[in-house]
Image (cartoon, grey):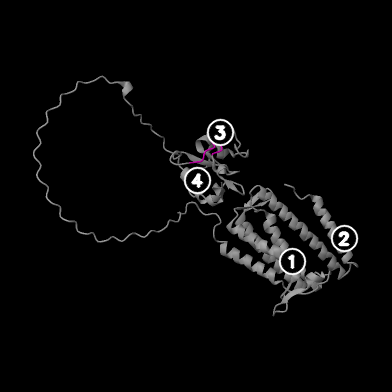
Amino acid sequence: MARVRWYHYLLIFLFFLVLGAFAGVPLEPPGTNLFYSWVLVGIDVMFLMKLADSAAYLRSFNSMQNHAMFVFGTNFAALVFGAWGNFTTIPFLAEPIFDLPVGWVVASWWSLVISAPYLIYGTYAVFACFRKYFYVYIGGKSVNSKKFGVGVVVSNIVLEVLYLSFVFAWFDDVDVPIDLVSRHVDPFVILFVIVSVVIAARYGRTPSIPDINAPLPTPVRARPRPEAAAPRPAQPARPAQPAQPAQPARPVQPARAWDRSATTRRVSVRVAAPEAIRVERVNIDELRPKGSVLSKEDFKCIFCFQLPKLPDDELRGIVICPSCRHPAHADEFKEWAKSSGLCSRCDAKLPETFRKRPRIVSVKVYLDAMKRLSSQIKG
């Protein structure tokens, strides 16, 4: 798959830089506003290209867009481009679409064309943090998606309040080389912030990762009402049976020597009791293998490459790697840990205390976790 190269972005930026320089001559208000407006349009085009390129790249690996650029980046772009609606002087974009009865609330074409796509996707990204993603990746580091979503919503509120305070209260006291074309509030941005707050309030308390100790919902079946039993008809009396003649006694068979080849011996195997599970309460977040998209291969033992199953593995526990969270049968893990201090799958260093006394989860609990994660397992 062909990726967008850095020089493609450079060419686009230079094009809009030159366009803004020609359109904004002389570089003084309002020419400065026009220059910066065209530069922002170029940045908008480059950011859209970056989003589309990264989305196509992740889609080729069947991966979700749970990265900070898609979540925080789109939210921040929505606020920045929406804020510039008070400063743009591009003729066909600076004109208002309609004026609301409240004079300081104006919707412009700039906001609809430049800012609205980020507002729509940013709202979806916030919703996905609470209801779809388990992690959001910032570079190579993963953070809890719900906490990240709360942080994004709070930052939206803070940035919008600071911007409105700057426009309506502090702008006249600050010496900046741009003109304030109009003082208005963008209704699209305000609606975006309100919807983000509603999503956080609605789903912020609902755990994005269910507790596997909670019982699964079972359908309630109505019991059939017992019907009155019909009286059985009287059975006719059976005729008396004639007495059977006495059977002659069977001769006693002489004892035979025991034939070892003709006898199947039953060997009783005493199975050792399973180890005590030291995990009292486990969250699916602790058992879910790391990765944007899961497959059945992620739940196989990293040593024998077999899925845990019952009743075959009833007396075996599961050990979860603290780094990659991939499973291994407890007995196989202990044999491996005797000679190696690294995870067999991710090569991460295992803590010494974990090697000597690993955290063991029962197979039943792990299969329950797989059942709850079945909607995320592909294939």
Q: Which one is closest to the eye, mark 2 or mark 3? A: 2
- Is residue 340 or residue 256 the one in the foreground? 256
Q: Which mark is residue 18?
A: 2
Earlier-in-chain disc, 2 versus 3: 2
Residue shown at the point (69%, 51%) measured from the top left: 56
Task: Residue 323: name its quadrant.
Answer: top right
Q: Which one is closest to the eye, mark 2 or mark 4? A: 2
Q: Position of residue 6 (x, y in %)?
A: 80, 50
Query: Can you say whether 282 is above or below 99 in the image?
Result: above
Earlier-in-chain disc, 1 versus 4: 1
Q: Position of residue 63 (x, y in %)?
A: 64, 50
Residue underneath mark 3? 336
For mark 4, give the secondary structure.
Answer: helix
Q: Residues within 10 Å of mark 2 (few under 14, many from 20)?
A: some
| Magenta-drawn stretch contains 109 | no
Q: Pointer 2 and pointer 4: residues touching (CB < 8 Å)? A: no
Earlier-in-chain disc, 3 versus 1: 1
Answer whether residue 89 is visible to the viewer in this image.
no
Q: Which mark is residue 85?
A: none
Q: Amino acid at mark 3?
A: Trp
Q: Amino acid at mark 2?
A: Val
Query: Can you say whether 105 is above or below 58 in the image?
Result: below
Q: Residues within 10 Å of mark 3 (few under 14, many from 20)?
A: some
Residue underneath mark 4? 366
- Mark 2–mark 4 Cα distance, whole angstroms, equals 60 Å
Residue underneath mark 1? 113
Earlier-in-chain disc, 2 versus 4: 2
| Magenta-drawn stretch contains 305 | yes
